[in-house]
Amino acid sequence: MGKRWAEYEAIYNLHINGLCELSDYTGFIHYDFYLHNGACSQIRDAILNKSEFISFSTFEFLSDYRQKIAMDEREPDTLVKGGKSCYKKIVEHYNAFFGKEYKVLDLWDKHICLCNAFCMPRDGMAELMAFLAWVYERKLLEGYDFTNRYRAQGGFIERYVGVYSAFKQIRCVELRHWYDYPLKN
């Protein structure tokens, strides 16, 4: 898979080796996320309440959309530009895989999970991974960032997770975290 896929490479390898099927819930969080006091009990409560998606890094869709992250075949090594938004392609791929007819506008008032920082039950994870594996195995993101300047595949794939969690309308529990700060006593 290679370094351009970042944390998704680990997630994909857990999936294809059947390791996500070994537990009721599987989760991922970055090495530099520090969960606040009480987070473990919140995670436990969310699992006991059969939450379908636990997000550790939730954003308003529009705040991410306004970054103008591009996925434009005409300029494959450009990360930010006024060209084709990565979300246009992501929604097209979502619709193709799930047989839906969503538009980017349908995300306007939603919150999305970014940074591949989430936890979900086995069945939901299997469905999400089937979608992400479909994207990877068809090489749908290989036409971008040829110089690996932006690690774009890793950045794009976390947005696929965000779109999935928003469109599936699953019960999402948002657990806030501290990001890149030392733990405080």
Image: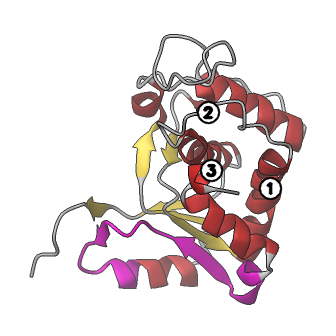
- Amino acid at the residue labelled 1: Ala
Q: Position of residue 102 (x, y in %)?
A: 75, 28
- The quarter in which the C terminus is drawn is bottom left
- Amino acid at the residue labelled 3: Val
Which mark sits nearer the N-terminus, 1 or 2?
1
Residue 47 to residue 174: above or below:
below
Tell me the CA gap for discs 3 and 1. Answer: 12 Å
Q: Is residue 40 visible?
A: yes
Residue 80 shown left or right of residue 6 in the figure: left
Residue 55 to residue 88: above or below:
below
Q: Position of residue 131 (x, y in %)?
A: 80, 52
Tell me the CA gap for discs 1 and 2. Answer: 21 Å
Q: Residue at x 47, y 37 (%)?
A: 150
Q: Residue at x 27, y 59 (%)?
A: 179
Q: Residue at x 52, y 43 (%)?
A: 151
- The quarter in which the N terminus is drawn is bottom right
Q: Position of residue 144 (x, y in %)?
A: 64, 30
Quick one: which residue is furthest to the front in this view? 147
Helix, strand or loop at label 3? It is helix
Tell me the CA gap for discs 2 and 3. Answer: 23 Å
Which residue position is annotated with label 2?
A: 146
* Mark 3 neighbour class, 10 Å CA radius: few under 14, some 14 to 19, many 20 or more: many
Q: Position of residue 99 (x, y in %)?
A: 90, 38
Q: Residue at x 24, y 60 (%)?
A: 180
Which residue position is annotated with label 3?
A: 161
Which marked residue is nearer to the observer: mark 1 or mark 2? 2
Which residue position is annotated with label 1?
A: 133
Which mark sits nearer the N-terminus, 2 or 3?
2
